[in-house]
Structure formats: structure tokens, C-alpha cells
Image: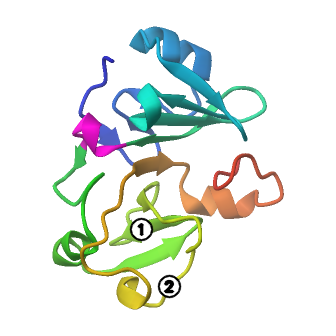
Amino acid sequence: MALNNIVIPGISLGGIRIGDKVDSAIDKLGLSCVAQAPNNFVIIDDGVLYIGYDMDRLITCVGCSSVCGINYKNKLWAGMSVQDVLERSKTQRAECGYVIIDNIDGIGLDLPNEFDDFDEITDFLPLNYVFETLSIFKPLWQIKRHENNAVGSRIYT
């Protein structure tokens, strides 16, 4: 898999850009181990990478596991613990299934499916809980503006 280490919140992760055609991204990366998942997602290499897309097959989000080794400004990466998050950020909030830190919109750590809101990140997650996935997505103000057009379990267009 030919990913780079560049992360631009709300725009791209590893060279995969929001708004590009999912099929083009898969071809460009030379991916061969791709599984189609429900709700307009493709899962690559058994969950190392996922790409969400809309009904026009335009990419709406990209997520990666710690295997990718992608790190955003030494603040966010897949495989970090709640303790890591608390040590590297001033604020944390839960929105649309993600932990957003320091109001950096368009990037976050995937929350467990059963949790989508908290007052304090430690309300329901222990300090040693590890976030398995780092994701980029459209900035939340765009998501909220179009909430009635849900695609996938967490991503809106």
C-alpha cells in the first residue's frame, strides 16, 4: 500500500482525499485486498485502512489503524491511549462518533460505537483505553448542515 504520512484535517489522510472517487483512490494506491462493507465503506487489508463514500462514490472519510504509522503533529494517531490524548491536548469533545481535540475540526479518533457523547473523556473510558482508528472527515460544520442526508454509520454529506 503506497500511503504517505501527510494528514490534512478535513481534506486528506495518507494521500487519499475527501471528494475523490473511491475507485480512483483504490486504483492509485494499487490496493488488492479490498472488501466492500455495508453502508458505503471499503475496508482495506483487514481494517488497516477504511474509506467511506457517498452515493456518487465520492470519498467522505478516511480512517487508518496504527499499522499505517500515520501521526498528525504528534497530537493524534491511531493506537494512542486516553492518557496520551489528555497529555497532548487542552480540550476534548465527542461529536459524530469521534473524539475531537483542541477544536481541530475534520480529524478525530473513532469512539467505540456505544459511546458518542461525554462531558469528560474519562467518564466512560479508562486511561489505558486505546483508540484503534484515526480518521479524517468533512469538517463538522458541514456535517451538521446536512444531517438529513446520512450515509454510513457516522459520516454525512
CA–CA distance between discs 1 and 2?
Answer: 12 Å
| Residue 118 circle label | 2
Residue at x 44%, y 77% (from the top left corner): 93
Q: Is residue 21 visible?
A: no
Query: Identity of the amino acid at label 1?
Result: Ile
Q: Position of residue 151 (x, y in %)?
A: 74, 46
Circle 1 sits on which residue?
100
| Colour mode of the rendering | rainbow
Q: Residues within 10 Å of mark 2 (few under 14, many from 20)?
A: some
Dividing the picture into quadrants, the one containing residue 81 is: bottom left
Q: Is residue 125 left or right of residue 57?
A: left
Dividing the picture into quadrants, the one containing residue 122 is: bottom left
**Residue closer to the observer: 107 or 111:** 111
- Residue stretch rendered in magenta on the structure: 65-70
Residue at x 53%, y 20% (from the top left corner): 34
Q: Is residue 83 visible?
A: yes
Q: Position of residue 82 (x, y in %)?
A: 28, 73
Q: Residues within 10 Å of mark 1 (few under 14, many from 20)?
A: many
| Residue 113 circle label | none
* Figure quadrant of the N terminus: top left
SS of the residue under disc 1: strand
SS of the residue under disc 2: loop
Residue at x 68%, y 53% (from the top left corner): 153
**Residue closer to the observer: 65 or 20:** 65
**Residue closer to the observer: 157 or 97:** 97
Query: Identity of the amino acid at label 2?
Result: Phe
17 shown above or below 128: above
Q: Position of residue 4 (x, y in %)?
A: 26, 26
Q: Nearer the viewer, mark 1 or mark 2?
A: 2
